[in-house]
Image (tube, rainbow, N blue to C red):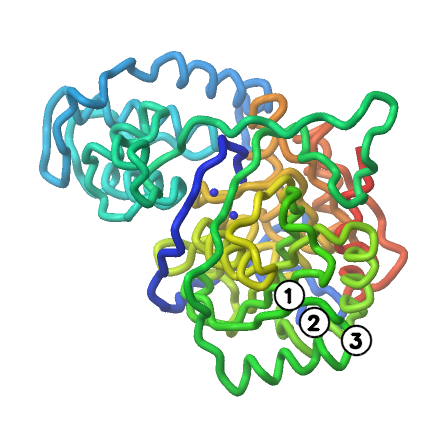
Amino acid sequence: MAVERTGGFRVDTSRLARADEAAPAARAPAEGTAPPAAPGAPATPRAPSGSFTIAAMRDRIERAAEAAPAFDPDAMSTQRTGSRGAEVQTLQTALNAWRAERGLPAIQVDGKFGPQTRGAVEAFQRATGMAVDGVAGPATWSALAGRAPASAAAGAPASPGPAAPAAPPSPPSPGAPAAPGAPGAPPSAAGPTTTVPAGGSTFPQTAETRRLEGAWRSAGLTGNLSISNLPSNGGRPAAVYVPANLDPSKPVRVITYFHGHGGNVGDSLGRQGQFERLKALERANPNTVFVLPQAGSKPFSYWMKPPRESGAALEREALGEAARLAGAPSLEIGERVLSAHSGGGLALKNLVQAGEARADRIEFLDATYGDWGHVVARWAAAQPEGRRPRIDSWTTPGDTRNHDREIARIAPGVFHAHDSPVGHSAVPGRFLGASIGQP
């Protein structure tokens, strides 16, 4: 959901077409089974060779930001595939500054608008909620310059680029801070909130989505629920659950959970104890919105991988649906938690590599297979102070625990490893949302 914390902005509910991708990926165990070794990955992935350090990455980000050209977006002409010249160089340098802030590799600055530059423009547009066409027009230039396009300022439906940061909510009264899990707790110190308007219409539902909804009702969850096929999730089901006593006038916490191989957003949640965990979390803070997208067949290489799927669009669609369920014109997001079990960890890696990760807290629930945790931790550690998400990981003996020791060394202070006292399939039922109580 774009895991950066930026200023508040309003977004529409644009939809993406469905398609699946079947590239090979490091595999996690099926739901309910013990975790085998990750195929094709070394038992203990190593940090990159050479002089890589988190401090070096931060230094690289600062240097990229300093190198970003100061330009007047109104003076820039539209650039597209085949364009050449100084303005393309300015575009490439500005894109690299944005990419460096997210731990993404730089593109070549050569003044030639080719496939690589087009892909970088598309990634920027996607992450900032714009129409994705790969063309650097007025809206894209304005967003790169850090201001909203004139059309958005004039009150047109916005999506093209970040607007001015929303005013932060009032702090709690002195001597009476809200507890992390208490209703109405202020947003994290990570940054301003984001307001998402209610969706104008519901998404497609089928016999399968209704069957999945039945599992929630059988479990005794009494809040407002919608399970529908979201375009941002490849046209597959995604569950959106809003506690009955959510107060839409206050900021909400959004917990987005990616399940593991062989799971779904219905009965498998009950088998693993997650329904009971959701009940506990909504009791602790009724102002929590739960978003649970469902994967298709494994491997999960396609999950949350643009352009066919999008974490940014998932947040817009799911939170628009949540606002509708809450009977509110919009919801203000105060805190984001991204959580993944087993193979769902690959979705977190894909979000980061697409520049679409947005989180205050990230949870790996026995899910640091292959290089998934390494990629996410390096990205998180490279974020500026105050925008750096905390990562907590709970593991069982085996590959994930070995990986966590390595990750903790390369991202100290950001990545926090915990030994799980329960088996692989029971980890999410025990620890989903457990990072919320951590400092």
Task: Looking at the picture, tell me which residue is in the foreground, 140 or 24.
Answer: 140
Residue with the most extreme right position? 421
Amino acid carrying label 2: it is: Glu
Q: Position of residue 267 (x, y in %)?
A: 70, 79
Q: Distance between the residues labelled 2 and 3?
A: 23 Å
* Residue at the spot of label 2: 31
Determine contact: label 2, label 1, CB under 8 Å.
yes
Return the residue nearer the eye: 117 or 258. Answer: 258
Picture layout, residue 203 above or below residue 280: below
Say few, some or many: other residues with alpha carbon within 10 Å of mark 2 (under 14 / 14 to 19 / 20 or more): many
Residue at position x 80%, y 25% in the image: 173
- Residue 260's disc number: 1
Between the C-alphas of marks 2 and 1, the distance is 6 Å
Type of the residue with mark 3: Gly
Residue ID for mark 3: 220
Residue 164 location, quadrant:
top left
Left or right, 209 with respect to 399, comes to left
